[in-house]
Image: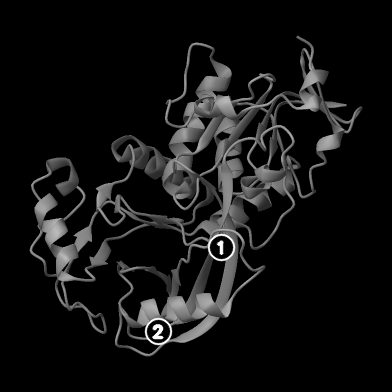
Amino acid sequence: MTTYDYLLIGHGLAGATLAHTLRRRGRTVLVYDPGHPNSASNVAAGLINPVAGKRFALAWKIDELLPAATAFYQAIEQHYGDTFFIQTPIQKLFSSVAEQNTVVARSADVPWRHYVTEVTGALPPLPGVRQEFGGIQIQHGGYVRLRELLATLAQEALGQGWLRQEVFDWSQLMFDADGASYAPGQVRARQVVCCEGVGATQNPYFNWLPLTPNQGEVLDVACPGLPEKQVLNKGAYVVPLGEGQFRVGATYRWPPFAEGITPEATAELSQRLTDMTTLPFTIRAQRAGVRPAVRDRKPLLGRHPELPILSIFNGFGSKGVLLAPGLAVQLANYLENSASDLWPEVNISRYHALYTAAPAAAAFPS
């Protein structure tokens, strides 16, 4: 039997980030992941946007989480000798005069202005880009080549033997006073962390949390001549992939939704791209993924109410690329140090009133 410090379920963005964080601290980790090529993390464009939403509000705790994310991705780049985090301006194109006025009214907000260039309601002209109502340039953001990053991390993990591309069988997980065993006689771990994304809705220990699947679709398009030194945003994002290729997304669909890609998403995203450019484009690919979304739009971190050996790191929705690195450090500190605590906005204790003890929990000794 092999014993590990941590057993992680899931190697999407959340699981991969936490595994990397723990291993850098010298902890032994074993990860189970089914290896779905169209998981939400593999479909996402990896956008980091400090100013977002209809109210143009600063992203939550941006001044703490953005430096943590930047340092995390840069350290990985240095380790692998590759570029994953592309720091580039985001050109937010206004959809109306009312939207323009909203931004001008906020321009006196000093913390907000740190992330936005001087607000004039106009941007320098870009070839093929529609700017009828002007826009703003958002700084200190960009995008992560997430599919490539996860593939690189998985390749190393598989080669070193601490990632197993298998479906995790919850019926084979048993708890005792000293830890947990999986497939009895094969694996033991001091702690278990659930990072399986939307799969948490089927998790027998955490299915009481208000995690709701949210489907998103993206298009990969060829649009020769469209500038590639920035991200465009107007009802959708347009992220450059290189050589005249771009990723356009994403849609948001709440259940019930169709399996796989839909013609409705093709039409919606095509129209949104047409609203941003006068140039012709060709759709090269379309992908759909299901995000793990939470009702209050904050991730889910913390220990199970009755099983302190079992924790969760999930619910990042569409902002995981920004949130996961800093919160992985916070969760690692929490699990390793009893004096450390989690931010209340992400601690699952905020939902403990929803918890009803499951029969499986009774197997753990009091």
Q: Residue 345 appears in which quarter of the rendering?
A: top left
- Which residue is the extreme one toward the bottom? 280
Using residue 157 as the reference point, say whether residue 268 is left or right of it: left
User: Would residue 188 be visible to someone looking at this image?
Assistant: no
User: Would residue 294 be visible to someone looking at this image?
Assistant: yes
The image position of residue 145, as x and y in percent, is 48, 59
Which corner quadrant holds the N terminus?
top right
Q: What residue is rendered at 38% in x and 68% in y?
A: 236
Q: In terms of depth relative to the viewer, which is nearer, 361 or 126?
A: 361
**Mark 2 residue type:** Cys
Q: Earlier in the sequence, mark 2 or mark 1?
A: 1
Q: Which residue is mark 1?
A: 43
Residue 223, numbered circle: 2
Q: Secondary structure at mark 2?
A: loop
The image position of residue 318, as x and y in percent, is 47, 53
Using residue 276 as the reference point, say whether residue 337 is left or right of it: right
Residue 79 vertical position relative to residue 282 in the rendered view, above or below: above
Residue 46 vertical position relative to residue 260 in the rendered view, above or below: above
Q: What residue is rendered at 47% in x and 32% in y?
A: 346
Q: What residue is rendered at 59% in x and 61% in y?
A: 289
**Mark 1 residue type:** Val
Q: How is the image coloured?
A: one colour
The image position of residue 356, as x and y in percent, is 68, 26
Observer-side mark, 2 or 1, equals 1
- Which residue is the extreme one toward the right? 185
Q: How far is mark 2 from mark 1, CA to CA? A: 20 Å
Dot 1 alpha-carbon crowd within 10 angstroms: few under 14, some 14 to 19, many 20 or more: many
Residue 291, numbered circle: none
